[in-house]
Image (tube, rainbow, N blue to C red):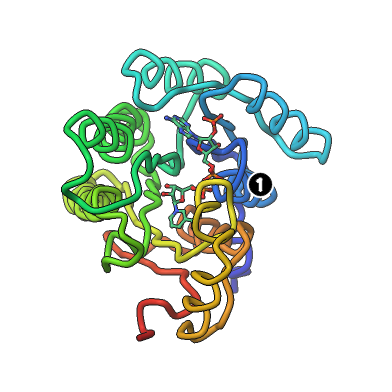
Amino acid sequence: MGNLNSKFDLSGKVAVITGSSQGIGKSIARGLAENGAKVVVSSRKKEAVDKVALEFKTNGLEAIGLPCHIGDPEQRQSLIAKTIEAYGRIDILVNNAAINPYYGPLEGSDEAIFDKIMDVNVKAPWMLSNLALPHMKEKGAGSIINISSVEGLRPGFGLGLYSATKSALIMLTKHQAKEWGRYGIRAKVLCPGLIKTKFSQGLWTNEKLVSDFTKSLPLGRIAAPDEMAGMVMLLASDAGSYMTGGVYVADGGYMVSG
Ligand code: NAP
């Protein structure tokens, strides 16, 4: 009888995590590395990714830092090329980086903002996945995990354009799962609820908003970034070998509240 726990082991696997210099992405990178993966820590700022990679290595984990603004086509190419140069393969791609440049009513934004948010939140994960595809195909296996949001499932905090990008990412994932399953590639999407990071600072520093929000939330609190890593550790590994095309929430019960 095999040991089921060993299915979580990611030894020999290489994972690229965009937006992993802090917040949810950093927790995911650490979790994957703790389970044995060699991780590529990436974000726009070189100093930031180098610092996190060093921190991981100091703690006995395998990591390199590669800067990449995911909205830039050349930097996307270079992220994948340099990962192959360094580690020779890509088994796991976590499309985590995203932006939200605008809070407010739909009609209050403009076309430039729309184009920018679609570019980073939807086009970049699409293109990065396409760039990783040949390397996964070659091995007959791969795991793509796209980080969406409960905002992609339900309109919540007046983040209309951002919500629309996160819905698009969910549908992109379902198509990836459907089209690439034949190559042994699994695609899944994680939808976090409200997590305490820099990204959501405008929400969780608003005491009234947090108090109203958590009152109706089954678990009654917002979450820490580390609470998102476990699901990705499962989805990336053989423990999740039959999981593809799924949408998984980690939201303290937000989707069943109200
Ligand atoms: P965060 O703590 O602000 O971290 C964002 C990360 O992305 C940083 O490493 C940042 O580093 C990087 N980044 C930003 N723009 C980038 C770009 N254009 N190219 C590459 N990297 C970029 O954010 P987070 O809350 O962990 O968010 C991570 C993901 O979770 C996002 O997809 C977000 O939509 C989703 N999410 C968050 C929440 C929440 O409540 N926090 C809820 C639902 C979903 P640099 O500045 O160095 O680039």
In x, y percent, where is residue 42? 54, 30
Q: Is mark 1 within 8 Å of ligand 1?
A: no
Q: Residue at x 51, y 24 (%)?
A: 44
Q: Residues within 10 Å of mark 1 (few under 14, many from 20)?
A: many
Q: Quadrant of the N terminus?
A: bottom right
Residue 138 picture quarter: top left
Q: Which of these two is toward me, 114 or 97?
A: 114
Q: Is residue 184 visible?
A: yes
Q: Is residue 7 visible?
A: no
Residue 185 vs 240, above or below: the answer is: above
Q: Which residue is mark 1?
A: 30
Q: Residue at x 36, y 35 (%)?
A: 136
In x, y percent, where is residue 225? 60, 57
In x, y percent, where is residue 55? 77, 35
Residue 121 vs 251, above or below: the answer is: above
Residue 237 vs 125, above or below: the answer is: below
Q: Which of these two is toward me, 234 or 109?
A: 109
Q: Quadrant of the C terminus?
A: bottom left
In x, y percent, where is residue 153? 27, 66
Viewed as shown, does residue 217 lie left or right of 248? right
* Number of numbered discs: 1
Q: Residue at x 48, y 58 (%)?
A: 238
Q: Amino acid at mark 1?
A: Arg
Mark 1 secondary-structure assignment? helix
